Image (cartoon, grey):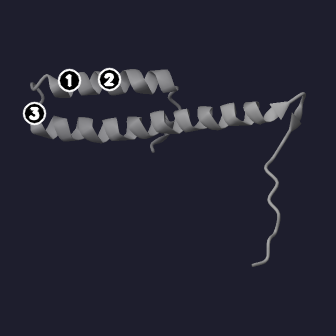
Amino acid sequence: MEAKESKLSFEAALAKLESIVESMESGDVPLADLLAKFEEGSKLLKVCESRLKDAELKIEQLKQTKDGVVFAKFEADREA
């Protein structure tokens, strides 16, 4: 992921991705440009997925936090 894409917010990356998809669906894009747009769209999709995953992890952390105390799963060492 390039530095400029990695700094985009989820909303900005999604808006750019939607714009790319619309232009690709129009059918007026030459093949060379289509390939470049596909590559850019793939990078933006990764940014969006990363932002969503970060948000999901944050929500899980918040759900596990109660009164300032974080409860972690207890994993006992079991011998077979």
Please give the label number shown on residue 23.
Answer: 1
Give the residue at x 32% y 37%.
40
Quadrant location, the C terminus:
bottom right
Q: Name the residue under label 2.
A: 18
Residue 75 at x, y percent in the picture: 80, 59
Provide the secondary structure element on which disc 2 rests: helix
Residue 63 at x, y percent in the picture: 74, 31
Indicate which disc, 3 or 1, sits on the residue closer to the N terminus. Answer: 1
Quadrant location of residue 29?
A: top left
Q: Residue furthest bottom?
A: 80
Amino acid type of the residue that numbered disc 3 sits on in the rendered structure: Pro
Amino acid type of the residue that numbered disc 2 sits on in the rendered structure: Glu
- Kindly report the distance in space between the C-alpha atoms of the residues bearing marks 3 and 2: 18 Å
Residue 38 at x, y percent in the picture: 25, 38
Give the residue at x 17% y 26%.
25
Q: Name the residue under label 3.
A: 30
Q: Tell which tag, 3 or 1, sits nearer the viewer.
A: 1
Give the residue at x 80% y 71%.
78
